[in-house]
Amino acid sequence: MPSANYRSLLRTPGAAAFFLPASLGRAGIAMTGLSLVWLVHGHTGGFSAAGLVGGAFAATDALVAPQLARLADRFGQTRVLPPTLLAHAVAVTALVSLVTADALGALLAVGGALVGATVPQLGAMSAARWAVLLRTDGRGAELPTAFALESVSNAVAYLAGPMVVSALAASGRPSAGTLLAASLTVAGGLALAARRDSAPPATVGRDERTHTERALPRAPFLLLMGLNLAIGVYFGAMQVSVTAFTVEHGAAGTAAPVFAVSGVSGLLAGWLYGLRRWRTAPASQLLPVTALLTLGTLLLLAVRSPLQLGLVVVLTGAAIPPLLVLFPVLTESTVHRTVLTQAFSWLGSASAAGSAAAAAASGSAVDSLGSRGGFAITAAAAGAMTLQSLFGVRALRTTGQPSPRRASASVSPRD
């Protein structure tokens, strides 16, 4: 049965014990940003302060995330997670208190920034654990399946989490969504921290490689950063453009079904992609997948109805999950293992930065040119990924195979 690939992964000793807590915490993280918007809006009655808090949260999350991941690489996940989770719980409590006390918007923004700065990097930590676990067991070929499982977990979290938060807010309990998000994040993080057996070894005090070999700003990794920045632009512009298109056609209510169709398409594609053992090298898969995404975004410029839009987003939605698997696979085979968590976190920050910039740019494009102005930005982002894949595939191929040292690296007791 095809799903046996996923079952065999989760039956690996220690795998389910870190993957499930990380997935629980990831659901909380997926709820946090939107829950803060609903929390502030529920008490102020406006979106100005809510947007300010949400923006502050997203900005500090993107900026601080790689630094938290760097500390996890250096000192070990089980040492860094508990104080991070404590700080996150305190920050959420402080923000809720500020909102309840009707504090000034500036203070609320500071509170949102503190919440964002303390978000634990559970996704990056879980991905790093998969890399250590499978490489140590000589099962590096199963990493694409493991990262596909991570991608599916992330997609489920970002589909279900916002729905739960919105439902709680609609029932008049916006603070419940924020507290639930924090509870899931802290509970999942603590359970992950308790699993010392699967945590990557800390690098502090160890005989490490030279700084040049460990450094992240090398051509292959910078290429992957550029790809993640572009896919972030795609996400940000797509959200605004689809919404604008449905409004233009007098069918604003169809926006949610269109996003749902895209999400389900992505979930199915990600699940199926991870089931297959691909003989084609990951670097060689980038170009056809990005070309498929580019084709889908060009078709968006020609759609004339919400139904046509829904059909096209099935195509674009199906092209995204393979990319979200290929990026970490190529990162794992490109960077040194002592900076792996940090590398995964930088990719997430690049995507977040691209999404934030695109949300603003596509809003202006829509105001000037209509929804097709926004879709033009999605097409440009997909085209940029295709060009990067075309000209960067050689660099990725030369670093796309694990070194003997990485493949045979022994894993000692953690932290």
Image (spheres, helix red, strand yellow):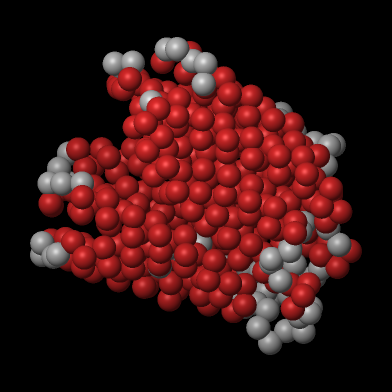
Q: Residue at x 57, y 20 (%)?
A: 299
Q: Residue 227, can we see it?
A: yes
In percent of width and height, residue 270 lies at: 62, 35
Q: Determine which quarter of the picture holds residue 203.
A: bottom right
Q: Residue at x 33, y 16 (%)?
A: 249
- Name the residue nearer the viewer: 263 or 126: 263
In percent of width and height, residue 369 lies at: 40, 27
Viewport quadrant of the N terminus: top right
- Name the residue nearer the viewer: 354 or 401: 354
Q: Residue 145, can we see it?
A: no
Q: Residue at x 58, y 60 (%)?
A: 346
Q: Residue at x 52, y 38 (%)?
A: 234
In percent of width and height, residue 21 lies at: 50, 56
Question: Farthest residue toward the front?
Answer: 368
In percent of width and height, residue 247 lies at: 31, 22
Where is 147 relative to 369, above or below? below
Question: Farthest residue toward the bottom?
Answer: 205
Q: Is residue 338 left or right of residue 188?
A: right
- Name the residue nearer the viewer: 167 or 217: 217
